[in-house]
Image: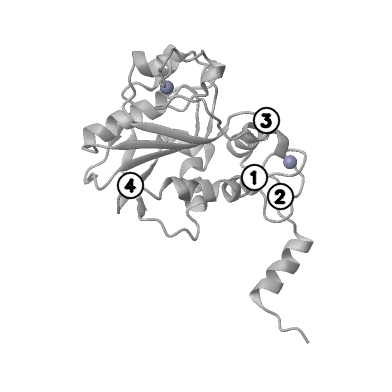
Amino acid sequence: MTPITTSTIRHSFRRFFPLSCAGCDGHVTGGAGFCEICEPTVHPIAAPACAICQVPMESFETPRHGASECSRCRQNRPHFDTARALWEYEGAVADALRRIKYGADFPALRALCRQARPWFVDQLREVEDKSRLIPVPSYPSELRRRGFHVPSMALRLLLKGAPVPTIIDSGLKKTRATEQQAGLTYDGRRKNIRSAFDYGPGFAPRGQAILFDDVMTTGATADEGARALRRAGFSTVKVIVLARAPMGVG
Ligand SMILES: [Zn+2]
Ligand SMILES: [Zn+2]
């Protein structure tokens, strides 16, 4: 008789309760994040992209001879050193993030993070020991309205079982409620989020600051968050997001 092990239990569990796709109500096999129908709409960010904010350059402009930074980064240098995203914000990735944010679809969040985990852990390989992973915070009233905080939940799922030298730090605070960034113009977004972050008492810069959010659109929120982290004393601020919208959005 075959002995019953944890892996046989897990195997039977998966057979009867297959994992769900992040982007639709379908199921996936082999631990993938997306089903076969959604997978072709999932696009990792490809070169050429801005060396600072990683916006895909072809969606915005043709880089000038020798220029590797987008025109927005050249005009208004962000307070972060680099931003890195795994996917373009479109197709099944955008569907998944909307299902999570507006429909509290936690199986979709688990599926998304399952797929992103190897890339995310790879991003942390070069960081200094005890570097801070800082989720972009919500204001308490915004948090109460939604009932959950996507960046914090995603970070925990992404780090599951990963031996990385980082500490999740919730010392960055949002100091006022802001309008939803979606639907605002680029200038509107910058104004809306201006000076909306600060750090709490006892927040000490250790290692590098890695500001984490689920999605980056114009980069205005990440820029303001990074500005507060610089003020707190971090000399290096990196931004990591799961998805990056093309520059034309917002
Ligand atoms: Zn699907
Ligand atoms: Zn840029």
Residue 20 image label: 2
Query: Mark 4 or mark 1: which is in front?
Result: 4
Name the side, left or right, on which 68 lies relative to 207: right
Q: Circle 3 is placed at which residue position? A: 91
Kind of residue indicated by mark 1: Ala
| Distance from the alpha carbon under mark 2 to that under mark 3 | 17 Å
Kind of residue indicated by mark 4: Arg
For numbered disc 1, what is the local secondary structure? helix
- Look at 71% across and 39% down and name the residue there: 39
| Distance from the alpha carbon under mark 1 to that under mark 2 | 7 Å
Query: Is disc 1 in contact with disc 2, using a CB cutoff of under 8 Å?
Result: yes
- Look at 74% across and 44% down and name the residue there: 35
In front of the other: 33 or 98 = 33
Quarter of the picture for ligand 2? top left
Considering only order in the chain, which callout, 4 or 3, is on the residue closer to the N terminus?
A: 3
Considering only order in the chain, which callout, 1 or 3, is on the residue closer to the N terminus?
A: 3
The image shows residue 162, relative to residue 23, as above or below, that is: below
- Residue 210 can be seen in this image: yes
Q: Circle 4 is placed at which residue position? A: 132
Residue 108 image label: 1
Kind of residue indicated by mark 3: Gly
| Whole-percent x, y for residue 79 in the image | 31, 27
| Distance from the alpha carbon under mark 4 to that under mark 1 | 26 Å
Extreme residue in the front direction: 65
In front of the other: 47 or 182 = 47
Considering only order in the chain, which callout, 3 or 2, is on the residue closer to the N terminus?
A: 2
In front of the other: 130 or 201 = 130
